Image: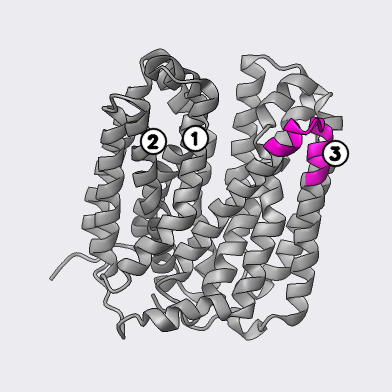
């Protein structure tokens, strides 16, 4: 007989995996200058490393999951982590920018299926009242990566070389791969996934309304987040140390907001989402005004992070619980939609800045988008099928 591991142990390994994947996604933001100098490209060109990643997650992630939909969860998770390890080795040894870009595309393709599988398995092994918490724990790896992984990666790259950062993530991925192969339960689906039925997720009004909240509301977060660093410099007059501290407080707020949302019972998700989105809109509307008071700048960075990542477990859980017809595809779709929203928000913020809008105006636009997301959530609360969030079994 095989050894059965505790739910907490399995979730911890999942969280280690999402930490590595999250660090890979965001760590390049602190290494762009090094990429430009070492690979002989413009800094503006290195921004493609972020854009290509987000687009690949949004497009190739669901396609990869559709292709592998009938694969058993455990070997698929191990296979996806193997892709992660290989892509980071490719990045660490990249002879030119094109190969580095290809490594980003490869790594991003496994992002959404990996998150989706981890979230689905985490929910399936949890009692109804702990399902939101299970999602928060999986998502927690990403938020901890934002708080600690990204600054550590920037430090590692600055002290040694950017290639060391990717070697570090490859090693972390290999350790995670061993952990997944060891602790992931060998669950078998009660029935083979039906792709046609799974694709019915795109006809599910409850799911479509949550997707609309993410794309038209949550995307406002990245409209402002993209320029968080220059705003801390301009309004709070921070140097390197102050900016680093501000980014840390954003990450700290992200971790606390994420795990606080994990304590919400499924039948209260929509009500809490309305509250969090409303508070986040207020924070962004006041953001640049309060940044001018240096001490309060850290408070605002913390609240920004808490509001941003306080919403993600709620929205992920709502999609997975609502998508009864797509137990295999729902988690991947959720992760992909978030990255699509990130790309839309970042592109809009850049467009507004290029058009001559000030940072203050951009934060007002972001606040307005999030407020619109709150309005959509209120509308959702009135028309959604509330029986979906009363704790029925979720297959996966």
Residue closer to the observer: 108 or 328: 108
- The tag earlier along the polypeptide, 2 or 3, is 2
Cα separation, mark 2 vs mark 3, equals 37 Å
Q: Is residue 353 magenta?
A: yes
- Would you say the residues marked 1 and 2 are in contact, meaning their CB atoms lie under 8 Å apart? yes
Residue 1 in percent (x, y) is at 12, 71
Residue at image mark 1: 48
Closer to us: mark 1 or mark 3? Answer: 1
Residue 62's image quarter?
bottom left
Point out the stretch of residues depicted in magenta.
Answer: 350-365
Residue 256 vs residue 377: left or right?
left
Label 3: which secondary element: helix
Q: Residue at x 81, y 33 (%)?
A: 357
Cα separation, mark 1 vs mark 2, equals 8 Å
Residue at image mark 2: 101
Residue 288 vs residue 349: left or right?
right
Residue lying at the far left of the rendered structure? 1
Cα separation, mark 1 vs mark 3, equals 31 Å
Q: Residue at x 34, y 52 (%)?
A: 13
Label 1: which secondary element: helix
Packing grade of label 2 (10 A; few <14, some 14-19, many >=20) is many
Residue at image mark 3: 286
Residue 102's image quarter?
top left
- The tag earlier along the polypeptide, 1 or 3, is 1
Q: Residue at x 49, y 35 (%)?
A: 48
Residue closer to the observer: 292 or 390: 292
Q: Quadrant of the C terminus?
A: bottom left
Residue closer to the observer: 91 or 98: 98
């Amino acid at each position: 007989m095989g050894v059965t591991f505790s739910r907490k142990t399995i979730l911890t390994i999942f969280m280690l995996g999402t930490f590595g994947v999250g660090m890979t996604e965001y760590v390049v933001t602190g290494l762009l200058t090094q990429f430009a100098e070492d690979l002989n490209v413009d800094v503006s060109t290195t921004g493609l490393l972020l854009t290509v990643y987000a687009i690949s997650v949004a497009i190739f992630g669901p396609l990869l999951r559709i292709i592998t939909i009938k694969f058993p969860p455990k070997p698929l998770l191990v296979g996806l982590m193997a892709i992660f390890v290989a892509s980071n080795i490719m990045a660490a040894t990249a002879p030119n920018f094109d190969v580095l870009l290809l490594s980003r595309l490869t790594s991003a393709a496994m992002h959404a299926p990996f998150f989706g599988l981890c979230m689905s398995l985490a929910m399936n092994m949890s009692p109804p009242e702990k399902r939101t918490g299970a999602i928060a724990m999986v998502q927690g790896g990403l938020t901890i990566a934002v708080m600690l992984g990204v600054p550590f990666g920037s430090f590692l790259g600055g002290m040694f070389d950017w290639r060391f950062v990717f070697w570090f993530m490859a090693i972390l991925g290999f350790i995670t791969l061993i952990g997944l192969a060891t602790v992931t339960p060998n669950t078998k689906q009660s029935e083979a996934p039906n792709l046609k039925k799974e694709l019915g997720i795109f006809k599910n009004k409850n799911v479509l309304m949550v997707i609309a909240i993410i794309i038209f509301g949550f995307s406002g977060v990245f409209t402002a987040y993209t320029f968080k660093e220059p705003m801390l410099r301009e309004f709070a007059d921070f140097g390197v140390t102050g900016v680093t501290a501000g980014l840390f407080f954003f990450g700290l707020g992200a971790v606390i907001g994420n795990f606080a949302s994990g304590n919400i019972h499924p039948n209260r998700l929509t009500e809490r989402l309305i509250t969090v989105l409303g508070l986040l809109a207020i924070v962004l509307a006041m953001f640049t005004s309060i940044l001018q008071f240096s001490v309060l700048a850290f408070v605002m960075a913390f609240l920004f992070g808490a509001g941003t990542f306080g919403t993600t477990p709620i929205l992920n859980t709502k999609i997975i619980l609502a998508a009864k017809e797509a137990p295999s595809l729902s988690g991947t779709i959720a992760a992909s939609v978030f990255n699509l929203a990130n790309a839309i928000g970042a592109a809009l913020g850049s467009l507004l800045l290029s058009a001559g809008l000030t940072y203050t105006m951009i934060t007002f636009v972001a606040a307005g988008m999030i407020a619109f997301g709150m309005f959509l959530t209120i509308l959702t609360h009135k028309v959604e099928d509330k029986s979906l969030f009363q704790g029925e079994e979720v297959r996966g």
